[in-house]
Amino acid sequence: MHKLPVADKAVLVSLDFGNGDHVDRVQELQQLALSSKLQVVAVIEGKRARPDPTTYIGSGKVEELAQVIMQNKVPLVIFNHDLSPAQQRNLSVRLNCNVIDRTSLILDIFAQRAKSYEGKLQVELAQLEHLATRLVRGWTHLERQKGGIGLRGPGETQLETDRRLIRKRVKLLKEKLATLQRQRNVQRRSRQRTNVLSVSIVGYTNAGKSTLFNKLTRAQSYTADQLFATLDTTTRKLFLTPSSSVVISDTVGFIRELPHTLVAAFRATLEETVQADILLHVIDASSPNRDEQVEEVNKILKEIGADSIPQILILNKIDLTDLSLDGKGCGRDEYDRISRIRLSAKTGEGIEFVRQALTEASAENSKKMYEESTDTKKITEGCATVQGFF
């Protein structure tokens, strides 16, 4: 997998285009940098009506940025925006250091965190697809002719060679992921035949999904106060009563403007979410931006085709807020189903309401399956009677 150059220091750059969420975006970029184990030396901010087509930030800000880089000997600049290949090249030349955008930073964090074989394949695929867009116009030094040596055909440019090698590797990765997806589908069909309720935990990154998963299943999934602590989907059977159980999955966290290459590459893993019967949507109740985070999660759920799956909203981290249960740790909808739960996955307060909600949902699912099988049996018997009559 392709990783960022080793650099312990970085300068962050973020422009305010008047959307009203600039402060939140800067804080999130800082969290991403810390998650990538970088020391943030400075944050360069500014206001513009629109990006500069050549350098994104304009010549004045480039000079200011160059001074900070020179004074602090910083080897890396991270933009809180997506840069075009030409803008990235121009900035790298003028600043004489590595320049990356937000998407590249997220991809690098994913590369650091992926542990499973499938996760590593998916991250590499996303990185290569992003890299392919960088080879369109940005790097003019790759256009030199290099004829007939090694892998290159006669007169083939370095750019064409790189494109061809990337396409070949992308094809191989997709084939491997398709094989893993078929295996996953077999496992899923096996679970469906047993009529076991499938539950997926979703939510914004660092909302506490893995902590809740561990508390419910007594698993040992990695947890940390950082973005994208979990990348690989983990699935466990959760026994609710001696005769009732569900299959529950912990999934990768979402973030605003999640790179499309990542959404596409992780589609196989996210199918655990698409195929779920119920989503536990974990929300960081202590975050001042929780409403925007909920909106972002729902946007991505719609993109992967999971927006019609019933959700139970989990307001987590109440131990960090002034919210208390006061005997009302859960709320019900018009069908008398538990639809909202307040809890602390860390302390365990309110966790019993999740088990209660899943127990009720499992019982309702079993009743539905029984009624469907009974109806099918009646139809079959009716058809047999009609055939006997004739």
Image (cartoon, grey):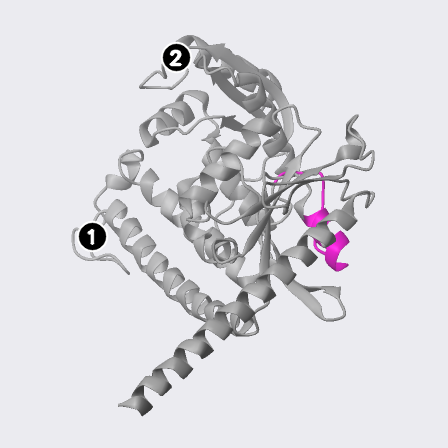
Is 284 covered by the magenta stretch? no
Q: Which residue is mark 2?
A: 58
Residue occupying the point 60% across, 32% down: 33
CA gap, disc 2 and disc 1: 39 Å
Asked whether residue 235 is in view, the answer is no
Q: Identify the image quadrant of residue 366.
A: bottom right
Q: Is residue 36 above or below residue 216?
A: above
Is 223 covered by the magenta stretch? yes
Residue 322 in the image: state x and y as whole percent.
Answer: 79, 25
Q: Magenta region: which residues?
A: 210-227
Residue most toward the left?
Answer: 155
Q: Nearer the viewer, residue 42 or 92?
A: 42
Q: Identify the image quadrant of residue 331.
A: top right
Q: Which residue is mark 1?
A: 147
Residue 384 in the image: state x and y as whole percent.
Answer: 36, 86
Amino acid type indicated by mark 1: Gly
Q: Does residue 131 appear to the left or right of 122 in the view shown?
A: left
Amino acid type indicated by mark 2: Gly
Residue 237 in the image: state x and y as whole percent.
Answer: 67, 65
Q: Secondary structure at mark 2?
A: loop
